[in-house]
Image (cartoon, helix red, strand yellow):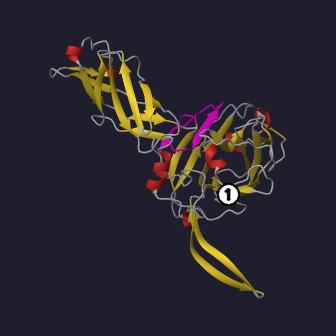
Amino acid sequence: MSTLKVSKVEPVTTGGDCIVKATNIVGNKNLVINGAMQVAQRGTSSTSSGFYTLDRFQFLFSGHNEALTQAQHALTSSDTGPWAKGFRNSYHITNGNQTGGADAADYAIIRHNVEAQDIANSGWDYTSSSSYITLSFWVKSSVAQNFYGNIITSDGTAQNYPYETGSLSANTWTKIIKTIPGNSNITVDNNNGSGFQIDIWPFGGTTYTASPTLNTWAAYASGTRMPNNTSTWWTTNDSTFEITGVQLEVGDVATGYEHKSYHDDLMRCFRYFYKADGYNSHAMISRSSTAIGATVNTPVPMRASPTAGAGNWCRVMKSTTTDDYGDSSTGSFAVGGSTPSVTVTGSMVFLQYGSMSNVTNTGNTGYGYLTNPIEFEAEL
């Protein structure tokens, strides 16, 4: 549940009544992590679909003739609106040249998933139509048009809530506020799965669109996520779309964005993704004559048992001589494929590589270290 701190209380007198007005209320009110787009552990630009740049935000696209680019973008004082509110980065999408036009199954989606237990313990009575949660964000498009988004609950019978930005002026930042009521059909489990999927669509083809009622909960169906939308942005070469200041908070009012330090946002992101340093940073010891392992301590416990990806190589040496078996990336010894087995205990992640064909007896026990960073993925 959110923890609030009231830093100032002012008595206000109106018509003989005394009203207490709290100002500068701060706390863990924002259920979105990295909404100010500060943290980009994986990199700052990519032309791939999926998690490749900004932490906790996923860009998905398909049906393209030319790949789209997702990037962390630095804002300047010319970014009227968000700059004055303290935002210095955005999630920036650049379209490719979609020469084939807009086909039914084409799409481009910015997605953020909120853990179910964070929704369940937020204080929002999500089964009551008189209890609200508010989504707000800044958005800018190089193309003037209306855009759509939708929210999907994951537990029980999935529910869908479509919304729109309204007509955006080209190259102009606009703040979007959506106050969302609860609904008796919503189920949210108190666990670490997905509870609230927030989608913002620069484009979605007719495979995903129909004529659902905006700002209303209904049973989710893939083909009725949002109303039919114009294809102008999708068919405009190098069109851009960017967002920042994404906030989801309990209540029927969009309060000021809850800015966090880079450190605080980074620590929250570590629960879902962590890149462990390579090259001699994590010692490896022999587990047997055919296996070797290393322990990596993650800064915080991860959401779920992670998978190990990207650059997960190790270098193994003989303990009795100065000779070495070589880097696993060169194929000089077999480690059962490029991905190690992963065991998690709290904040300790143990990696085991095996079977190593060159470690043939206990007399030549192997030892070594990781040579490249290893990425631990536990995203929703």
Callout 1: few (<14), some (14-19), or many (20+) C-alpha neighbours within 10 Å? Answer: many
Which range is magenta? 43-67
Residue 159 part of the magenta segment: no
Most extreme residue toward the left is: 321
Q: Position of residue 59 (x, y in %)?
A: 59, 40
Which of 179/298 is in front? 298
Q: Residue at x 46, y 49 (%)?
A: 267
Q: In which quarter of the image is the N terminus?
A: bottom right
Residue 115 visible in the shown view: no
> From where the camera sits, is residue 192 visible?
yes
Mark 1 residue element:
strand
Please tell me whether the stretch drawn in magenta is mainly helix, strand or loop.
loop
Q: In the rendered image, which quarter is residue 157 located in?
A: top right
Tell which residue pokes out farthest to the bottom in this image. Answer: 16
Q: In which quarter of the image is residue 211?
A: top right
* For residue 354, above or below residue 228: above
Q: Which amino acid does label 1 sit on?
A: Val
Residue matched to label 1: 250
Q: In which quarter of the image is the C terminus?
A: top right
Give 161 or 211, whichever is nearer the viewer. 161
In the depicted structure, whether residue 329 falls above or below residue 232: above
Question: Residue 94 lies in what quarter of the image?
Answer: top right
Horizontal and vertical percent position of residue 353: 36, 22
- 212 to the left or right of 64: right
Report whether 3 appears left or right of 120.
left
What residue is at 49 percent from the left and 46 percent from the top?
269
The number of numbered badges drawn on the structure is 1
Q: Where is residue 123 in the image (x, y as percent from the top left)?
A: 67, 55
* Residue 206 vs residue 51, the one in the foreground: 51
Percent across and percent down for residue 257 are: 59, 62
